[in-house]
Amino acid sequence: MMQALPPPAVEAPPPERSVATTDDLRVAAALTEARVHVDSSFRGASIVLYGAVFNPSDQPTDVVVVVRGPDAPVRLVRKVRTLGVWLNSRPVLFEGAPGFYMTASTRPLSDIADFGQLRRLGVGVDHLRIQAPEESRTVTRYGVRDVVVSRLGEDYLDWRRAVIRLREAAALYNTDPQGVSFVDRGLFRAEVELPAVAPVGRYHAEVWLFQDGEPASVSNLTLTVEKVGLERDIYDFAHRQPWTYGVLCVLLAALTGYGASRLFSRRS
């Protein structure tokens, strides 16, 4: 009787080696305050964002903090000279631009990553995503039709810069190339400065960790700015019943004007 041949010898696989991966490199962050209350005495707020970098390889890394506020439509006009008279141009509509936007980093963004990487991630004012409306969704206000961004042509960049310039002048957009500082080995901090005119709503914060020009990790945080007290009641009422709120404002203005006229007429 023939005996079965033994199975061929199989070479044992070499022992696995521990290889460092990008999963070993990560960032964690938190905010000292997750809610900011806005009332009549609100003059702005300063919030500290802090975190830690877990870097087993000890290779150089960079931290970039991006805080973006709620989006809102932006309508712009500019003065144009027509027949010797300065008039407002037709409004240009951007459907959505962040009401607040700031970046803070360990060094200038251009030294951390290349243009294409920053553009893909939308990191930095130059790479800020500002939504353009569709022509079918453009509406007429006060008998004047907005100019949609797609029809601006070469003037698009000028109008986009105008949005950023106006927000920077109001301290709503800010870029700090040295806004992130390491206070100890792997521990960092940055300050988020909210101006008095900061819009209410939900803010989103992204803490990016870069190494060799590539994003290695990101930590996402949320911040809520909300009105409180009487301001909150008036704000909610105005948004729930805008027509009633408008009528009451007109009546209040009329009564105030009438009362002022009666007062001055008596003094005269």
Image (cartoon, rainbow, N blue to C red):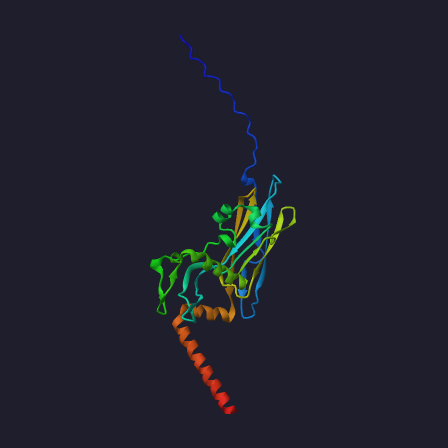
Q: Residue 159 falls in which quadrant of the image? A: bottom left
State the residue lying farthest toward the top: 1
Asked if residue 253 lies left or right of residue 24, the reply is left
Number of numbered labels in the structure image: 0
Asked if residue 93 lies left or right of residue 172, the reply is left
Q: Position of residue 139 (x, y in %)?
A: 35, 63
Q: Position of residue 224 (x, y in %)?
A: 51, 60
Q: Position of residue 98 (x, y in %)?
A: 48, 58
Q: Up-down: is 209 above or below 87?
A: above
Q: Up-down: is 266 above or below 237?
A: below
For the point 42% across and 79% down, which residue is it? 251
For the point 41% across and 61% down, which residue is it? 93
Q: Residue 4 falls in which quadrant of the image? A: top left
- Give the camera-side residue of 254 and 171: 171
Location of the N terminus by quadrant is: top left
State the residue lying farthest toward the right: 184
- Give the camera-side residue of 79 and 29: 79
Q: Position of residue 146 (x, y in %)?
A: 38, 63
For the point 39% across and 74% down, which residue is it? 244
Asked if residue 52 lies left or right of residue 230, the reply is right
